[in-house]
């Protein structure tokens, strides 16, 4: 057994060396030709996801980009204004051609409606990959924030175009289904795991948004040579933002939360912390910018506890509004429930929070907590610990303005160093080239045999 492991380890090391050499070469040489890049994503503009920036950046770099996506309905659960069952079926976005397919809107995000939303996109996008998309694609990139079934139309497109797939995992399946309670039966979890393994097996490279993700992906049969760490980058509006001025002393201390208001974010614990602070730190005001499955419940619970004057609900805001909102915050809040799968996750808002130059107040475990601690740009409570969250909020309220500003600047410098958009897009562009070359080499060898 040791000999076998040694043999495979040597093989992996040799392949890694080849991959590094190819990547370095690809990055320093001028590209001979532009790529025909297909991006497969269930969510796209006007929905607010980083894939929008990715598409715009790849077009800017001279690539011919096609997007296969659904009709926008996230997070409200209904079609955006101007979209419906009849389309539009084709659009332009930042120079990319966007093909849209019908799907069943997610509605209130209940289990059955969510399953229908996922499966309807997978079905109609697979049909579109067969009949509507341009046949010639050099490489396919999949943006997977849930569901993993977004990989199915990508596999169809890859078969039709004879092109490799890069699959960016931002949400682990089946673990996330268990964590949110969408699927509980053991047999169903095992069935989903088999499906995920099958999808990964059809990908040239699998990218994980955290280092911890890679270990879980590896357990589903993906060799280390095919794995890459690819975190979220700083969104453009934060990367270009100049350092924020020191926050003036004010009577009100605003704790701002931006993003999905859902089960995974543990709002019961947030409300419990707010209840504790209402007595000890009456100057704290909780500002929620976002929407989601449990928004109605959160508003009702806040009212029930007599906290209506402590909360401000802004609803879903355009991403362009976030820097200004964050600039007025005493701290930025990020939370996730206590669950093994969430401890592996770096919430997408963490990079934006860090880059905004304001202190972070977190109630999370694992990878997200590690990054905030490494940056020295915030304070972190254990997931689910509302009492500790309240104590840390009190600690921030008591800090002098210059200490808060220094904490925010440490966060920003860390973000620019670790999560710069150009840095990560350069890396991805190199992997796209690498995947094409490896795929073509293997196809040529297969034909030779």
Image (tube, helix red, strand yellow):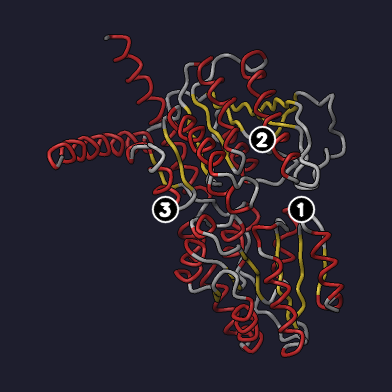
How many residues crowd around disc 2 within 10 Å: few (fewer than 14), some, or many (20 or more)?
Answer: many
Mark found first going from the N terminus, 2 or 3: 2
How many residues crowd around disc 3 within 10 Å: few (fewer than 14), some, or many (20 or more)?
Answer: some
- Disc 1 + disc 2, Cβ < 8 Å: no
Mark found first going from the N terminus, 3 or 1: 3
- The label nearer to you, 1 versus 2, is 1
Q: Position of residue 155 (x, y in %)?
A: 53, 24
Q: CA distance from mark 3 to mark 1?
A: 29 Å
Q: Which is more toward the observer, 313 or 337?
A: 337
- The label nearer to you, 3 versus 1, is 1
Residue under numbered circle 2: 42
Counting labels gives 3
Q: Is residue 352 left or right of residue 254?
A: left
Q: Is 250 located above or below residue 365 in the figure?
A: below
Q: Which is more toward the observer, 175 or 14?
A: 175
Per the rendering, the mark at residue 211 is 3
- Disc 3 + disc 1, Cβ < 8 Å: no
Per the rendering, the mark at residue 293 is 1
């Amino acid at each position: 057994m040791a000999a076998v492991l040694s043999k495979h380890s040597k093989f992996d090391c040799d392949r890694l060396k080849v991959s590094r050499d190819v990547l370095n070469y690809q990055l320093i040489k001028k590209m001979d030709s532009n790529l025909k890049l297909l991006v497969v994503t269930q969510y796209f503009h006007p929905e607010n996801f980083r894939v929008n920036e990715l598409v715009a950046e790849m077009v800017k770099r001279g690539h011919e980009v096609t997007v296969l996506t659904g009709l926008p309905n996230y997070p409200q659960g209904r079609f955006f204004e101007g979209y419906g069952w009849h389309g539009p079926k084709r659009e332009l976005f930042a120079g990319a051609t966007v093909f849209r397919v019908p799907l069943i809107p997610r509605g209130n995000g209940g289990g059955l409606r969510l399953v229908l939303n996922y499966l309807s996109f997978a079905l109609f996008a697979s049909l579109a990959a067969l009949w509507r998309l341009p046949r010639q694609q050099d490489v396919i990139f999949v943006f997977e924030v849930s569901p993993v079934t977004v990989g199915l139309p990508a596999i169809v497109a890859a078969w039709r175009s004879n092109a490799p797939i890069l699959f960016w995992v931002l949400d682990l399946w089946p673990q996330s289904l268990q964590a949110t309670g969408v699927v509980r039966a053991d047999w169903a979890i095992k069935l989903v795991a088999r499906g995920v393994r099958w999808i990964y097996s059809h990908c040239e490279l699998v990218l994980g948004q955290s280092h911890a993700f890679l270990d879980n992906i590896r357990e589903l049969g993906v060799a280390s040579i095919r794995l890459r760490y690819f975190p979220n980058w700083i969104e453009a509006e934060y990367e270009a933002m100049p350092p924020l001025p020191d926050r003036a002393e004010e009577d009100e201390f605003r704790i701002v939360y931006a993003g999905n208001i859902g089960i995974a974010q543990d709002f019961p614990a947030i409300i419990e912390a707010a209840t504790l602070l209402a007595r000890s730190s009456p100057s704290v005001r909780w500002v929620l910018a976002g929407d989601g499955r449990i928004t109605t419940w959160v508003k009702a619970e806040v009212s029930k506890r007599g906290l209506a004057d402590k909360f401000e609900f802004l609803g879903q805001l355009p991403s362009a509004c976030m820097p200004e909102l964050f600039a007025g915050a005493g701290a930025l809040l990020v939370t996730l429930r206590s669950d093994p799968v969430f401890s592996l996750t770096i919430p997408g808002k963490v990079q934006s929070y860090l880059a905004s130059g304001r202190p972070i107040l977190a109630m999370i475990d694992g990878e997200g907590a590690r990054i905030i601690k490494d940056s020295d740009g915030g304070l972190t409570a254990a997931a689910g610990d509302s009492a500790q969250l309240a104590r840390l909020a009190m600690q921030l309220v008591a800090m002098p303005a210059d200490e808060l500003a220094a904490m925010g600047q440490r966060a920003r410098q860390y973000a620019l160093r670790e999560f710069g958009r150009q840095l990560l897009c350069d890396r991805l562009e190199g992997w796209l080239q690498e995947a094409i070359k490896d795929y073509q080499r293997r196809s040529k060898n297969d034909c030779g045999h």
